[in-house]
Image (cartoon, rainbow, N blue to C red):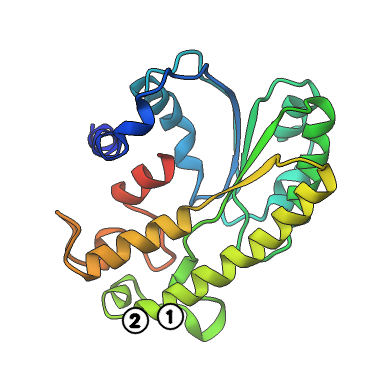
Amino acid sequence: MKFLRLVSILAILCGPLLAAAAPKGERVLVTAHSFHIFIAPRLAPLAKAAGIEGHELVAAQMIGGSKVIQHWNLTDEKQKAKPALAEGRVDVMTMSPHVYLPDEGIERFVELGAKQNPKLRFLVQHSWTPWDGWEGNDKVAKNEDRDTRPLDQVRAANKRFRENLEAQVHELNKKLGRDAVFITPVGDAVMKLRELIAAGKAPGLSKQTDLFRDQIGHGKAPIIALTTY
């Protein structure tokens, strides 16, 4: 219920986008780490709320803290993504790389999927940065450190992650000769929400830890709703 209430608020804010006739549903394949997997069971209710019929979750594949290449390298017994792509059963594939880029797994899945379905779209999530910074000394030691951490430091890490991902996506689309790979800018959306909290302009949210469950950065309900939307 909390998720649907948050989605309803987002729908009101973006109402003009929903005014046009709803598109047909898509067959979606989700490959994910823990900053992304939660979208899988929430896509159908969100599509329904937008008047979209026929949404289908083909499969959801989860590896905690993963790079996309780890999904590609899964054994046949655990592999859900490759068969779905090889059989042409997917319209949209989502991926959620870690900060370590470029990620060879993105390219491998794009090559396989595009070969079987030339109209396939790939959505690659630019997540918020784990531990509120880059590697090493930038990490927060505990979740509460987020409430006093300068957002400039978080913003710099977010920018670095996004630009590295943009570079790989640009090269993939250039190689394909069409725009097939798209970035979902979740990191930027979360950054904007954090700025609103810092400015006292986010109703019901008063501190940064209202968004996160632990020092790694697993999201609470507001981030889950924002990411899914």
Specify the quadrant of the image occupied by residue 88: top right
Residue type at mark 1 is: Gln
Give x and y (percent) for residue 179.
71, 42
Residue type at mark 2 is: Pro
Give x and y (percent) for residue 123.
61, 42
Q: Is residue 223 above or below residue 129?
A: above
Q: Give the alpha-carbon distance from disc 1 to disc 2, as whole Å.
A: 6 Å
- Pointer 2 residue: 150
Give x and y (percent) for residue 163.
61, 66
Is 65 or 156 nearer to us in this picture?
156
- Pointer 1 residue: 153
Q: Is residue 81 above or below residue 207?
A: above
Q: Secondary structure at mark 1?
A: helix
Q: Are marks 1 and 2 in contact (CB under 8 Å)?
A: yes
Q: For the view shown, which residue lies furthest in the top direction? A: 54
Q: Specify whether residue 212 is in view.
A: no
Q: Is residue 147 left or right of residue 89?
A: left
Residue at 46% across / 38% down in the picture?
Answer: 39
> Few, some or many C-alpha atoms within 10 Å of disc 2 (few <14, some 14-19, many ≥20)?
few
Is 58 or 164 nearer to us in this picture?
164
Specify the quadrant of the image occupied by residue 45: top left
Residue at 32% across / 52% down in the picture?
Answer: 220
Q: Secondary structure at mark 2?
A: loop
